[in-house]
Image: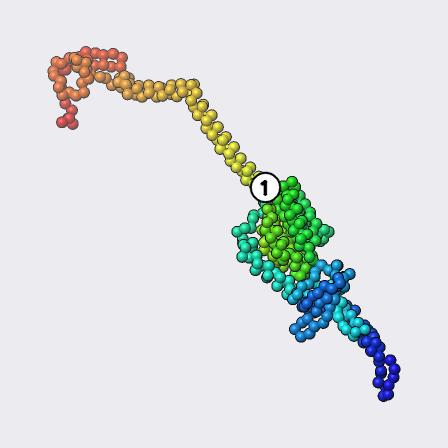
Amino acid sequence: MSDASGGIPRYSISELNQAIGSLLERGFAPRFLLDATVSRPQLKKGHLWLTLVDEQASISGVVWASQLSRLSYVPEEGDGVVVVGKLNFWASRATLSVQVLDIRPSLSSVLRQFERVRERLEPEGLFEPARKRPLPELPEALAVLTSVPSSALADLLRTAAERWPAARLVVVPIPVQGPVEAQICSALEATWNQAGALGIEAILLARGGGSREDLAVFDGEDLARCLARCPLPVVTGLGHEDDTTIADLVADYRAATPTAAMVALLPDRRAAVAQLQQLRHHLGQVVQLRLTGERQQLQQKLQRLADLHPRQLVAERRRDLQQALALLRALSPQHLLDRGFSLVRDEQGQLVRSVQGLKRGQPLLVQFADGQVSTDVREIQPSPAAP
């Protein structure tokens, strides 16, 4: 740079470009986040060149080959993205671009992809409630597909140990972010192919918290079809309560969180113990009532047997006979004779019940308790009250 009249600085082209580069380097943030839409992505010599645009402006961007291989997401035409970048200024050509250090789909892009896949799969009935299968009531073994290690896995293991420690968990490590849909599908297929040998009764697909953009892999069409083909019930616990993915719609049961998914799959042992105690109490009452009833029936049968014993029958018959004898004695004429009464019979031995029909001189026989006498009728005196 050389001085000119009037104190105005003079530059050569290279000096000017270098000054601009230095100014940008000193005055701009070394890293920044950029919301943009991807336009015209092109792969040249291993580098990804693209244009980042919004409604009013655009700027070039580049992902160097060394960085491209480490990205978990490679954008396509029209994708909304969030870029972690820094400015690159080439002094030789005075051109400015954004060097992309990391790139992720924006929420709007993720939601558009979700809607596209849903519109393709819904007519096929993959989301219909009628195809949802019931979960096992008391599973002996479950397959857990999630990232290892992770806080989600730690929560799942703790919840399983607290609720139903008898269940065996088969942990299958999977990646849960980025372009890993094919790996998740492979892990799913390998799991259900070994389910019979391992005794697995259901599969849990889980991922811990994160942004909705981080769950984009679970919106994949291939993964949805893989879940639909799974011969075992599938439970999803992906992200947060408000997050819903395509995988959630296809699964047999969608839980709000990984922990809630484990709660849905396993019974609560405390509730089971309380129910067993209640059943034991009820069974004890039923047995006690049954024993009481059987005991009463036995007592009745013993009493019946005692009542039918020959001695008892003889005693009852003896009592009956004694009562009959007493009755006979009470009704016997001899009993009347013993009380001082007498019986009068005519010459034919018939009882004389009235003075009517008697004649003077008719012979009669009078019977007393200790004997009888013969007499005849001397006088007949009817009772005044007689008709």
Q: Is residue 193 visible?
A: yes
Task: Name the quadrant of the C terminus.
Answer: top left
Tell which residue pokes out farthest to the right in this image. 2
Q: Going 15% across and 26% down the picture, which residue do you hit?
A: 386
Q: Secondary structure at mark 1?
A: helix
Residue nearest the observer in this picture, 233 or 189: 189
- Residue shown at the point (73%, 66%) measured from the top left: 49
Q: Residue furthest bottom?
A: 6
Q: Point out residue 195 in the picture as x, y percentages from the top left corner.
A: 64, 43
Left or right: 9 with respect to 77? right
Quadrant position of residue 69: bottom right
Counting from the top left corner in percent of width and height, residue 382 is at: 14, 23
Viewer can see residue 256: no
Residue found at the far front of this picture:
45
Q: Quadrant of residue 176?
A: bottom right
Q: Amino acid at mark 1?
A: Leu
Tally of numbered discs = 1
> What residue did someone put label 1 on?
276
The foreground one among 84 and 341 is 84
**Could you say where residue 99 lies in the image, as x and y percent from the top left?**
76, 67
Residue 368 in the image: above or below residue 239: above
Q: Residue at x 36, y 21 (%)?
A: 320
Quadrant holding the N terminus: bottom right
User: Could you tell whether 27 is left or right of 365 in the image?
Assistant: right
What is the x, y in percent for residue 347? Answer: 16, 12
Q: Is residue 102 above or below residue 176?
A: below
The residue located at (67%, 68%) in the rendering is 39
